[in-house]
């Protein structure tokens, strides 16, 4: 049997500090005294109330009115608790973590949606073999000069063209990267994503071997374009501007057949989407959240680059990224509408709770198996690590009533408990399917311990999930890295998919892999010029919550000053 | 061949035993309080006491239904015979040793009642049935050992409370304050399950003593009966997980 409670005695609980601040009462007391305070206890709710009054007066149509809640009983009959962004010292109100109220969260998604990675080798082959043109580092630099003029929406071939205001599209640019150090040395620094400088020596070696001598463009079209159009616009916008820049840089005929080769390569043959398109019943084009594979999110998030020796930390940043994208934005708004999904998601990246469960698992793994990634990828390991972390997590809910109140819904409790369990199994074994299997072990143990689980959806996927966690054939499942929000059982259930992304990433981070699924994506998002810093997801969310994050795509240049 | 005896639930601990009792229709639930049929109707809030049941079809015996083997096999419930509409009862149970939990209630329904549709969430549990059947079920659930007046509560909406810390008087938190603790130590419903004020207070008796709660609970807790201590239950759940994982798609996995 697990070493259990004796082992847990020496473990310092990471969530206690947040519990004290949130509830201002003894975190282990099961009696609450701060009740009936209403919205007056919340600066944000009062701000909303005042804004609602002002809007109603100005437009003559009623709006936000917190006194309408439940027949006039306002929210805040219990503590309207603040939230601590895990691993940071920043606290905010729950409202600040809805993506509508958080510019950093919006930019997180904007920066993914507006990105496409386009190979240059195909275009260079056409130039050299078909047209007999010479391609050199100098011509590549000149091409990039033109492309960074054209990509935001400027003309390079024709005159008398309308153009976009550079001040509105200043977030748009193109950089390139390669595994060829000699070529990289010849590229102007302003255009290069330098693998050697951005990654550890080991990771750089892995990435350069995977990429080889091929040359890739990381294209980021304007945020404002994706917001007005959609994610599927990205590679179309990009391909048009790339073709125009090619004409200009290599003095081509605008009508010659080779131009269509550039367009085809940029839009299809050499273009990599961040997300694949979805079937008709979900009906979205490329680069929309429903098509973004879990493994790819582990590459977009850069925490393993910054914390290569702390795979747990890196995995938790992926969870934070995933729950916000998949639950708050995808399921919560694209698929469902409303505001409730935020409450599920925040549980996974606030108050150091998931961190606590996961690092408990890390301690257990280190002591029992001699380190991360060293346990055999067997059912016995999953059952051992999975049972221990599950019981630890659930016992904390018993021992700290404020923790139970923080995760006041069963979906929050079992989602976060299963995430800690599953990430621990991934970290122990370096195997994503083993991690996923640990998730489902947690779920059925959780249900039997408490006699309750999550909302109805948890009955759907979590009580049959054991049976598909090792299925990797295409018509039955897939390796977890290749699954995504459109995987049949995952398509409607909040509180899971971000965690799955973290589980798949954890297995690779545990083994010191530089990337999870795609080395090109890993390198593209290492770019420090991006608006959102993907190495510190939770810290960026905190900046958004505290209204300190400066996003792109603002329209103040073209609207009346307020 | 030995006669099959339903086992209901694995485990050797007190929680497992209590779960078996609740699920086993042969086990007679201990009656702990009186709640009149009129008061049950008031708490439910679906019809005024004495008001006729609303129907959605004529009584079955007047319907001249076609010959059907299933109809002959299944005895309709009283509500179905009369053509009652479908109504609901919904309960919230505190994690702090309330006798019931959502899953236990659902398992209990499947073993003890017919003609019901039950829904199980983390913080509430609902049963839907023909109206007079719902009243009978709600009456049973309010009067017996599956209910603690302080820690169980009928809540149609705004159900939050199961996971929240308790009030200073020991009651489970309820944003709508549907129940209150009287000076006589009894808990009273002052609003119906959906939160509409009642014309009179309805007593559901005194809260259970803490030592009784810990003996009657169907939930494992570290400050009560621990799941770690029930090795049989743990092994059973692990076995189910392992069989599901390994049997699926005939996976060959290293033992």
Image (spheres, coloured by chain):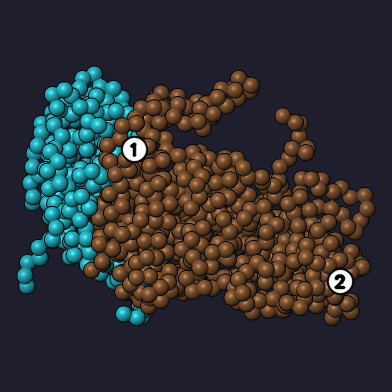
**What residue is rendered at 26% in x and 67% in y?**
A2
Q: If the image is split into quadrants, where does the C terminus of chain A sit?
A: top right
**Location of residue A451 in the rendering, given as x and y in whole percent from the top left corner:** 25, 52
> A529 left or right of B166?
right
| Neighbour tally class for label 2: few under 14, some 14-19, many 20 plus, Cα within 10 Å | few
Res A138 label: 2
Residue behind mark 1: A25
**What residue is rendered at 71% in x and 42% in y?**
A554
Q: If the image is split into quadrants, where does the N terminus of chain A sit?
A: bottom left
> B248 left or right of B236?
right
Q: CA distance from mark 2 to mark 1?
A: 66 Å
Nearest to the observer: residue B230 or residue A186: A186
Do callouts 2 and 1 point to residues on the same chain? yes
**What residue is rendered at 25% in x and 32% in y?**
B168
Kindly indicate the quadrant of the structure image that contains residue B143.
Answer: top left
Precedes in sequence: disc 2 or disc 1: 1
**What residue is rendered at 73% in x and 40% in y?**
A555
Q: Is residue A155 visible?
A: yes
| Neighbour tally class for label 1: few under 14, some 14-19, many 20 plus, Cα within 10 Å | some
* Display colour for chain A: brown
> A392 left or right of A559?
left
């Amino acid at each position: 049997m697990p070493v259990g409670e004796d082992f847990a005695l020496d473990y310092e609980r990471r969530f206690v500090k947040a519990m004290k601040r949130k509830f201002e009462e003894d975190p282990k007391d099961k009696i609450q005294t701060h009740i009936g305070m209403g919205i007056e206890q919340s600066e944000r709710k009062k701000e909303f109330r005042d804004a609602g009054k002002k809007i109603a007066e100005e437009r003559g149509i009623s709006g936000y009115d917190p006194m309408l809640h439940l027949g006039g009983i306002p929210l805040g009959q219990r503590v309207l608790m603040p939230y601590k962004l895990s691993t940071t010292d920043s606290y905010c109100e729950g409202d600040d973590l809805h993506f509508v109220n958080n510019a950093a969260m919006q930019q997180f998604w904007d920066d993914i949606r507006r990105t496409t990675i386009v190979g240059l080798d195909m275009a260079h082959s056409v130039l050299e073999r078909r047209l007999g043109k010479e391609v050199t580092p100098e011509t590549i630099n000149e091409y990039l000069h033109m492309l960074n003029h054209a990509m935001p929406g400027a003309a390079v071939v024709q005159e008398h063209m309308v153009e976009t205001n550079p001040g509105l599209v200043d977030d748009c640019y193109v950089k390139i990267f390669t595994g060829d150090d000699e070529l990289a040395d010849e590229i102007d620094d302003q255009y290069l994503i330098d693998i050697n400088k951005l990654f550890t020596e080991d990771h750089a070696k892995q990435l350069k071997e995977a990429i080889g001598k091929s040359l890739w463009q990381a294209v980021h079209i304007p945020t404002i374009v994706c917001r007005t159009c959609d994610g599927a616009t990205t590679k179309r916008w990009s391909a048009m501007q790339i073709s125009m820049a090619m004409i200009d840089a290599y003095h081509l005929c605008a009508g010659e057949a080779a131009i269509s080769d550039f367009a085809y390569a940029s839009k299809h043959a050499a273009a990599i989407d961040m997300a694949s398109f979805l079937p008709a019943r979900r009906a979205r084009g490329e680069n929309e959240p429903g098509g973004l594979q879990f493994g790819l999110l582990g590459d977009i998030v850069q925490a393993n680059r910054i914390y290569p020796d702390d795979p747990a930390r890196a995995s938790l940043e992926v969870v934070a990224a995933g729950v916000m994208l998949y639950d708050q934005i995808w399921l919560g708004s694209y698929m469902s509408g409303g505001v409730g999904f935020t409450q599920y998601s925040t549980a996974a990246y606030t108050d150091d709770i998931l961190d606590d469960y996961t690092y408990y698992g890390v301690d257990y793994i280190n002591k029992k198996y001699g380190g991360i990634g060293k346990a055999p990828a067997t059912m016995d390991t999953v059952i051992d690590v999975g049972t221990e972390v599950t019981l630890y997590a659930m016992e904390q809910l018993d021992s700290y009533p404020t923790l139970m109140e923080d995760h006041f819904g069963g979906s929050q409790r079992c989602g976060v408990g299963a995430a800690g369990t599953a990430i621990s199994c991934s970290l122990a074994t370096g195997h994503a399917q083993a991690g996923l299997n640990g998730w489902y072990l947690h779920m059925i143990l959780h249900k039997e311990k408490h006699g309750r689980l999550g909302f109805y959806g948890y009955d759907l996927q979590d009580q049959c999930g054991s049976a598909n966690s090792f299925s990797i054939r295409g018509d039955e499942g897939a390796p977890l890295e290749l699954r995504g929000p459109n995987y049949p059982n995952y398509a409607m259930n909040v509180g899971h998919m971000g965690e799955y992304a973290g589980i798949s990433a954890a297995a690779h981070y545990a083994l010191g892999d530089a990337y999870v699924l795609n080395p090109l994506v890993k390198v593209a998002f290492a770019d420090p010029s991006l608006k959102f810093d993907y190495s510190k997801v939770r810290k960026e969310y905190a900046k958004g919550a505290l209204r300190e994050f400066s996003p792109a795509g603002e329209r103040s240049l073209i609207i009346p000053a307020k | 061949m030995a006669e099959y005896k339903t086992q209901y639930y694995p485990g050797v601990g007190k929680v497992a035993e209590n779960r078996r009792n609740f699920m086993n229709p042969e086990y007679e639930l201990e009656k702990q309080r009186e709640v009149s049929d009129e008061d049950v109707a008031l708490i439910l809030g679906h019809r005024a006491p004495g008001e006729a049941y609303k129907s959605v079809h004529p009584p079955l015996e007047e319907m001249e239904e076609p010959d059907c083997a299933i109809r002959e096999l299944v005895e309709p419930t009283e509500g179905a015979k009369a053509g009652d509409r479908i109504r609901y009862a919904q309960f919230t149970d505190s994690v702090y040793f309330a006798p019931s939990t959502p899953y236990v209630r659902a398992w209990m329904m499947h073993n003890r009642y017919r003609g019901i549709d039950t829904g199980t969430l983390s913080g509430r549990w609902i049963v839907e049935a023909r109206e007079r059947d719902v009243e009978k079920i709600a009456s049973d659930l309010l009067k017996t050992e599956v209910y603690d007046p302080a820690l169980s509560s009928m809540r149609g909406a705004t159900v939050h409370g199961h996971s929240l810390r308790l009030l200073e008087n020991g009651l489970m938190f309820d944003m709508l304050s549907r129940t209150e603790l009287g000076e006589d130590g009894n808990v009273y419903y002052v609003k119906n399950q959906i939160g509409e004020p009642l014309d009179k207070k309805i007593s559901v008796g005194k809260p259970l003593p803490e030592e009784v709660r810990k003996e009657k609970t169907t939930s494992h807790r570290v400050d009560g009966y621990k799941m770690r201590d029930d090795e049989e239950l743990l092994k059973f759940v692990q076995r189910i997980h392992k069989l599901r994982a390994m049997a699926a798609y005939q996976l060959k996995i290293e033992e």
